[in-house]
Amino acid sequence: MTRIHAAFAAALLIASGSLFAAERAIDPAKSTISAVFTQIGVPVEAPFTKFTGKVAHDPAKPADAKAVLDIDTASFDIGDDDYNAEVRKPEWFDTAKFPKATFTAIGLKPGANGSFEASGKLSLKGKSVDLKVPVTIKPQTGGSSYSGAVSISRKAFGIGDPAWEGTVEDTVTIKFRIFVAAAR
């Protein structure tokens, strides 16, 4: 009986090792996440400069893909210190109370022309919204890039000072290009 338990334990370790080997950290230096919004009729694109995440994706099994991205909300950089301080306030991101936004995706659904759709949940400022996110996957030297864009309602997350109503539109598009190194 001891040999059977040992063999079973060894099999579990081997299986779990292969599962964890498939999960790879994103490379923030080769990745971008930004928000595009309209302020006073002018489109503005601003990056989040700090984020981390992991992707587990076997191209032969897209339905089993998983990804988690954690975005430092205080790293949103509009390019002006006063505006950056404003969006950190409780009326906007409330970065003191909610320092990160998290997107968790489970599964990729194949679409037309090699595209995919990721089903996931965006949690931001204490609220969560289910999203369907279009994703394009491109092999690159040393890894793969996952890119796309999805529109969200900032009001669904309680983001925005009422004094800015009519100045900043509700719809915000989140654009991303995530690079993940090839498994070794």
Image (cartoon, grey):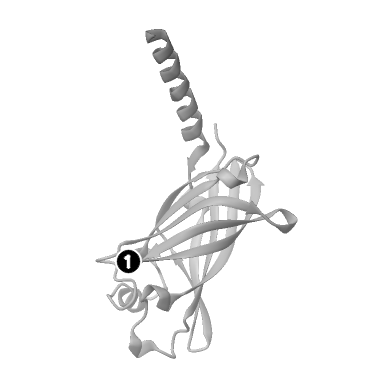
Q: Quadrant of residue 175?
A: bottom right
Q: Residue at x 71, y 53 (%)?
A: 114
Rendered position, 73 above or below 30? below
Q: Residue at x 36, y 76 (%)?
A: 158
Q: Quadrant of residue 136?
A: bottom right
Q: Residue at x 45, y 14 (%)?
A: 7
Quadrant where the C terminus lies? Answer: top right
Q: Position of residue 101 (x, y in %)?
A: 38, 61
Outermost residue to the right: 113
As drawn, is 183 to the left or to the right of 16? right
The residue identified by callout 1 is: 126
Q: Position of residue 180 (x, y in %)?
A: 54, 45
Q: Position of residue 72 (x, y in %)?
A: 36, 60
Outermost residue to the front: 1
Quadrant where the N terminus lies? Answer: top left
Tag count in the figure? 1
Tag 1: amino acid:
Gly
Crowding at label 1, few (<14), some or many (≥20) Cα neighbours within 10 Å?
few
Dot 1: what SS?
Answer: loop
In this view of the protein, which residue sits in the foreground, 16 or 88? 16
In this view of the protein, which residue sits in the foreground, 76 or 125? 125
Q: Position of residue 75 (x, y in %)?
A: 37, 64
As drawn, is 8 to the left or to the right of 63? left
Q: Residue at x 56, y 50 (%)?
A: 107
